[in-house]
Amino acid sequence: MKKVLVIGLGAQGSTIAKHLDAHPMVEQIVCADYDQVLGERLAASLYKAVTLRVDARETASIIAAAKGCSMIVNGLPLEYNLNVMEAALAVGANYMDLSG
């Protein structure tokens, strides 16, 4: 597990990102959310993080953010699950869902 996308940076997603930041097998965390400022604040508090603005209504936006990721952690509401799952399949990443 070298590069991980955490999409949805609310209470659960940000907590997962903080734990991943301490994990020795994780090289990079892509912190993705529709709210760019939220992502920037979180990434600034982590060592291995970069941030991207992602519109989860658009599967292509998630796919672009997930390129090269071996895992996607979905912290978004249930309504976005199919888009995030389709993106995980498209890039060949493992998938973990926190909401459903």
Image (cartoon, grey):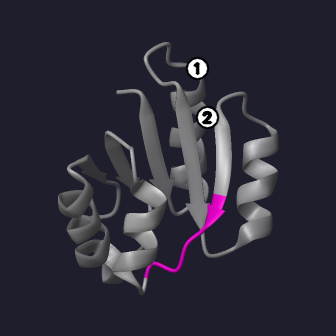
Residue 95 in the image: state x and y as whole percent. Answer: 25, 50
Q: Residue at x 35, y 50 (%)?
A: 72
Q: Residue at x 35, y 27 (%)?
A: 1
Image: magenta residue range: 52-56
Helix, strand or loop at disc 1? Answer: helix
Residue bearing mark 1: 22
- Find residue 98 and name its label: none
Does 8 appear in magenta?
A: no
Residue 56 in the image: state x and y as whole percent. Answer: 45, 78
Residue 79 in the image: state x and y as whole percent. Answer: 33, 83
Q: Residue at x 81, y 53 (%)?
A: 41
Amino acid of disc 1: Ala
For this rendering, which residue is in front, 49 or 17?
49
Left or right: 95 with respect to 58? Answer: left
Q: Is residue 69 visible?
A: yes
Q: Residue at x 71, y 58 (%)?
A: 39
Amino acid of disc 2: Lys
Q: In the displayed structure, would residue 46 be above or below residue 89?
A: above
Residue bearing mark 2: 18
For this rendering, which residue is in front, 67 or 14?
67
